[in-house]
Image (cartoon, rainbow, N blue to C red):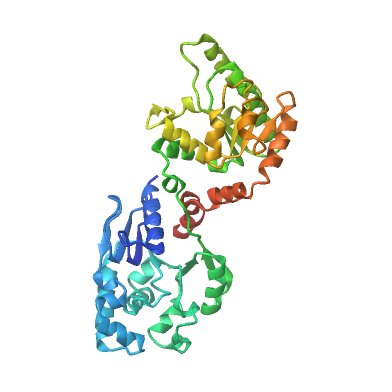
């Protein structure tokens, strides 16, 4: 996809400076770049962290006490000197030049915090100019914090330049903040209607946070695993005693009860075992007959970077972290290592009631009656999983708080 909209992200600093806002703008910039938007950062201090994303450093954009201690002290006392005006004029000129070839300017905290009021004033002047840059592009003020929401700051300065720029937003600026609490408070401060402020929460990158392998990251996105109510994992060999057909019937039963569910099956058929190949083919036929062909995922068929996936120890660990339940309806086992692996990963388990699985699982797993109907067993599994508040939180995060989800549903509409 070719996107002509170009984006400039403004803040006091970026990577390698470590902080909450710096982490957010780094994530935003990478998302814009990934999805084809020309994007650059304009900051007071920082370095390029991605070859696709240029970083312009204007040292005067740093927090004011790092730029000019004397000026910082003066401004903190409400004194606006020629020194301030000179810095503001310099920033105005440099910012105007840097913004000249961008369509969108996203300023994080610059228009709501007092860390560099000369920068705030320079940006506000560009926005308010009757012609020129301010009228040719969209400005977004992204408020993580706001000075006048903090009771420690002098409220009497809210109407005094340049402090008033933090409480009286420039017209035409799209206001964004990170939570409904911030939204309500900003609406009161700005005398806005709450509906005029957009909430875009901070997010998380599951692949990065969990240190997922490239293969896991690839097929998670490709298969859209976050869209499922339940993701079941069956790490198994392709042999009949593993009773994989029971697992497939359960997937059918759970989907029939209105809960979108998929099954990840790790093992390919053994090419040296004719019965293993026949069993594999029968399982694929069963999934097709039950209408769950797309929800029974044989990982041996998946590809990443044009090559078939190989299940190694790292990828297996990733599968446990990405799944919602270990499904293990085997008819016979000598031990049952997957139960141990699930326990280490805090993963709920549904398994057949056979020794030694009962020895390992004790009272801490859901036992399956292999003679019961798929529908009855499906209902038991749903009721069992619905008790897990941690699973409900996991689903909420995966659906609404991943950076990819936030970008698609919240950020893209802002810049269109």
From the top left corner, tell me how far across and down residue 377 is, in percent.
72, 32
Viewed as shown, does residue 14 lie left or right of 356?
left
Viewed as shown, does residue 195 lie left or right of 34?
right
From the top left corner, tell me how far across and down residue 326 is, in percent.
58, 34
* Residue 207 figure quarter: top left
Residue 132, above or below 220: below
What is the quadrant of the N terminus in the image? top left
Viewed as shown, does residue 403 lie left or right of 326?
left
Query: Is residue 394 in sight in this rendering?
Result: yes
Q: Nearer the viewer, residue 354 or 311?
A: 354
Residue 96, above or below 53: below
Residue found at the far front of this picture: 359
From the top left corner, tell me how far across and down residue 409 is, in percent.
52, 53
Query: Is residue 191 in sight in this rendering?
Result: no
What is the quadrant of the C terminus in the image? bottom left
* Residue located at (29% from left, 78% from top): 65
Circle count: 0
Residue 55, above or below 168: above
From the top left corner, tell me how far across and down residue 392 is, in percent.
62, 49
Q: Nearer the viewer, residue 366 or 360?
A: 360
């Amino acid at each position: 996809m070719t996107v002509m909209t170009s984006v400039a992200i403004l803040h006091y600093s970026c990577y390698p400076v470590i902080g909450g806002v710096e982490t957010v703008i780094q994530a935003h910039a990478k998302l814009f770049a990934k999805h084809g938007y020309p994007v650059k950062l304009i900051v007071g201090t920082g370095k390029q962290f991605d070859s696709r994303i240029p970083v312009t450093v204007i040292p005067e954009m740093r927090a004011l006490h790092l730029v000019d201690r004397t000026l910082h002290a003066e401004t903190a006392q409400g004194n606006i000197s020629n020194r301030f005006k000179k810095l503001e004029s310099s920033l105005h000129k440099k910012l105007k030049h840097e913004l000249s070839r961008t369509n969108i300017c996203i300023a994080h905290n610059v228009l709501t915090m007092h860390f560099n009021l000369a920068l705030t004033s320079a940006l506000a002047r560009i926005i308010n100019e009757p012609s020129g840059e301010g009228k040719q592009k969209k400005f977004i003020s992204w408020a993580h914090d706001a000075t006048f929401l903090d009771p420690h700051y002098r409220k009497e300065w809210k109407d005094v330049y340049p402090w008033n720029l933090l409480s009286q937003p420039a017209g035409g600026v799209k206001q964004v903040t990170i939570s409904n609490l911030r939204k309500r408070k900003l609406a009161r401060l700005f005398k806005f209607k709450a509906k005029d402020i957009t909430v875009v929460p901070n997010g998380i990158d599951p692949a990065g946070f969990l240190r997922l392998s490239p293969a896991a990251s690839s097929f998670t996105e490709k298969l859209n695993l976050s869209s499922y109510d339940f993701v079941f994992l069956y790490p198994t060999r392709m042999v009949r005693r593993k009773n994989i057909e029971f697992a497939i019937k359960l997937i059918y039963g759970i989907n029939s009860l209105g809960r979108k569910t998929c099954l990840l099956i790790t093992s390919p058929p053994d090419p040296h075992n004719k019965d293993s190949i026949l069993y594999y083919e029968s399982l694929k036929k069963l999934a097709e007959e039950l209408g769950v062909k797309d929800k029974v995922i044989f990982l041996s068929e998946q590809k990443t970077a044009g090559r078939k996936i190989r299940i190694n120890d790292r990828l297996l660990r990733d599968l446990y972290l990405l799944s919602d339940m270990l499904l293990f309806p085997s008819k016979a086992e000598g031990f049952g290592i997957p139960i141990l692996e699930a326990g280490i990963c805090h993963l709920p388990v549904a398994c057949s009631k056979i020794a030694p699985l009962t020895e390992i699982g004790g009272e801490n797993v859901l036992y399956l009656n292999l003679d019961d109907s798929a529908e009855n067993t499906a209902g038991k599994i749903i009721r069992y999983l619905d008790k897990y508040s941690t699973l409900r939180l996991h689903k909420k995060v995966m659906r609404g708080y991943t950076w990819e989800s936030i970008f698609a549903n919240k950020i893209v509409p802002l810049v269109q």
